[in-house]
Image (spheres, grey):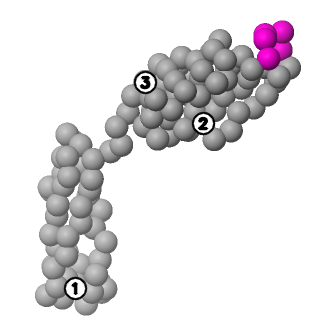
């Protein structure tokens, strides 16, 4: 056990699954601690919702952007690559179609140019 004289007045608390008041269901967890007579709380919030990344390979860039935006993903940059496919056709995407990703995360596209 640590002596409180070595701890600052406010100490960060790390919650580790399986130790104390933690949850594996993704719900918020609160833990109280007392240091030098002062109490504080640490809260772990639920992780961001995940969903499968839609398949947009073969779609036009415009259609792909609309599908990804509707699914909750961001596409900040589109790379262009020489190809035999019609100009503006999505050639690849990362993450791959069907892979689980947090909503609001980035999907990179490469389109024919």
What residue is drawn where x is 75% and y is 20%? 88
| Lower position in the chain sequence, tag 2 or tag 3 | 3
Q: Nearer the viewer, residue 25 or 20?
A: 25
Q: Residues within 10 Å of mark 3 (few under 14, many from 20)?
A: some
Where does the image place residue 104, in percent across and percent down from the top left?
46, 41
> In the image, 11: left or right of 73?
left
| Lower position in the chain sequence, tag 1 or tag 3 | 1
Q: CA distance from mark 2 to mark 3?
A: 15 Å
Q: Residues within 10 Å of mark 1 (few under 14, many from 20)?
A: few
What residue is drawn where x is 26% and y is 56%? 44
Q: CA distance from mark 1 to mark 3?
A: 47 Å
Q: Which residues are magenta?
A: 83-87
User: Where 53 falls versus 4 (above or below)?
Assistant: above
Tell whether label 1 touches label 2 (CB within 8 Å).
no
Tell whether label 3 touches label 2 (CB within 8 Å).
no
Where does the image place residue 28, in percent across and percent down from the top left?
20, 52
Q: Where is residue 37, by image quadrant?
A: bottom left
- Give the residue at mark 1: 4
Q: Nearer the viewer, residue 63 or 4?
A: 63
Label 2, secondary structure: give it.
loop
Where does the image place residue 72, in percent across and percent down from the top left?
45, 34
Label 3, secondary structure: give it.
strand
Label 1, secondary structure: give it.
helix
Q: Residues within 10 Å of mark 2 (few under 14, many from 20)?
A: some
Is residue 100 visible from the viewing direction of this image?
A: no
- Give the residue at mark 2: 75
Dot label at residue 52: 3
* Magenta segment includes 84: yes
Q: Nearer the viewer, residue 100 or 110?
A: 110
Q: Quadrant of the N terminus?
A: bottom left
């Amino acid at each position: 056990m640590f002596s409180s004289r070595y701890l600052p007045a406010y100490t960060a608390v790390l919650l580790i699954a399986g130790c104390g008041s933690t949850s594996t269901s993704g719900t918020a967890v609160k833990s109280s601690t007392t240091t030098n007579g002062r109490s504080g709380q640490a809260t772990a919030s639920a992780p961001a919702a995940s969903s499968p990344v839609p398949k947009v390979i073969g779609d036009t860039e415009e259609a792909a952007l609309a599908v990804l935006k509707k699914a909750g993903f961001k596409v900040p940059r589109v790379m262009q690559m020489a190809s035999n496919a019609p100009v503006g056709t999505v050639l690849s995407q990362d993450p791959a179609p069907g892979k689980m990703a947090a909503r609001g995360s980035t999907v990179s596209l490469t389109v024919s140019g």
